[in-house]
Image (tube, grey):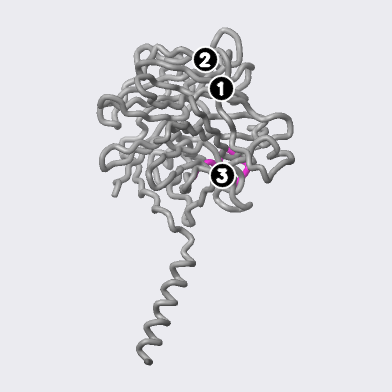
Amino acid sequence: MKHAVTYISILLLALAVLSCRHDRSPAPLKFTAWEGNPVLSPGEPGTWDELFVWNPQIVLAEGKYYLFYLGGNVKGRMAVGVAVSMDGLHFVKFENNPVLSPADMGFDSFTVGPGILLRNDSAWLMYYNAQDMIAFLPGRSAGMATAISPVGPWVKSELPVLTSGGPGEWDSGFLIPSSVLKLDDGRYMMFYSGGVELASFKDFFVGMATSEDGISWKKYNDPQTTGHPYAESDPVLRSGSPGEWDGAFIWMANVTASKEGFTMYYSGTRENSREEIKFIGYATSKDGIHWEKYSSNPVFQSTDDPFVTSQGKIGYLENPSLLYSDSVCFMYYECGPFKVESSYIGLATARVP
């Protein structure tokens, strides 16, 4: 009888420990910065991307790695370019860059990008942030373009496919697509960054929208929240508590879907300053709406990349884009010293169990 009581006590203790585990979802991957960083640098003076290369987006097609990025020059206009690689490490910029440029007029007349790509049957779709004013800031609209090849030619839609919220809403200032997925049931999901004012560097959240055709989108809206700033829609992931690594804001979430659910790698900062954008966190979800942040976040940061630390004390790292290729996961990110004219794209890799 004594042994039975002891066994039951141990069993109950084990169950109690398991029930108290904070993380019941798959653990994040362990990334190591590539020793050859950066994989992409700004262009020579006078080129269209002479000032910076931002917001990487990686896709694999027919054995080639296509690294899309947002580039800009001293005139301030920003466009989407692409670099191509056979191994995911060594990239050559496409000779006909940029592949997507601002229009002469309309909702995307000053800035397009970053380019978020999705393969849809026999065509490629690109979703991008659009700005119609002369401003070094993201715009309030998301456009869409189509092509039969990753390098184009890309044909843009005449109207936005998604726009920021109205006055008083959490995403009234800007809306930047960061991931678009096509699910097994044929539906589409878009994850985007939104906020009221970029210059404030606070209260940037991750939103989500769904679509039946990839063209007409509907933002997630919790019916329990009926007043501003969540009257029209709701974020699916918000920043942490003050003082935490992501306590100021989060943005540019890269989301992957599988049979087990969704995984997200996202940028975060603890202070209201772009100089503190140094961290990448991890979260998981069963439905793409309710997310659980990993308890040991962040999972990667600027000090993990020797190239970033070599650039000086104020080094930043953000905007992850992941690609799973066989047993290796490639994670590309924007990084460098904290100055616009020296922004690069780096790479870290991880073994996939």
Identify the residue at image location x=64%, y=41%: 203
Locate residue 270, reporting x and y percent. 58, 47
Locate residue 184, reporting x and y percent. 39, 36
Local secondary structure at mark 2: loop
Residue 161: assigned label:
1
- Mark 2 closeness class: few <14, some 14–19, many ≥20 residues within 10 Å: few
141 relative position to 304: left or right:
right
Q: Amino acid at mark 3?
A: Leu
> Looking at the image, which residue sits at the far front?
185
Pick whichever of labels 3 and 1 is earlier in the sequence. 1
Residues 85 and 127: in front is 127
Disc 1 to disc 2: CB gap under 8 Å = yes
What quarter of the picture does the N terminus occupy?
bottom left
Quadrant of residue 327 within the rendered picture: top left
Please give the range of residues in magenta: 270-279
Residue 237: assigned label:
3
Local secondary structure at mark 3: loop
Identify the residue at image location x=50%, y=20%: 144
The CA distance from mark 3 to mark 1 is: 22 Å
Local secondary structure at mark 1: loop
Quadrant of residue 235 within the rendered picture: top right
Disc 2 marks which residue?
A: 157
The CA distance from mark 1 to mark 2 is: 8 Å
Q: Amino acid at mark 2?
A: Ser
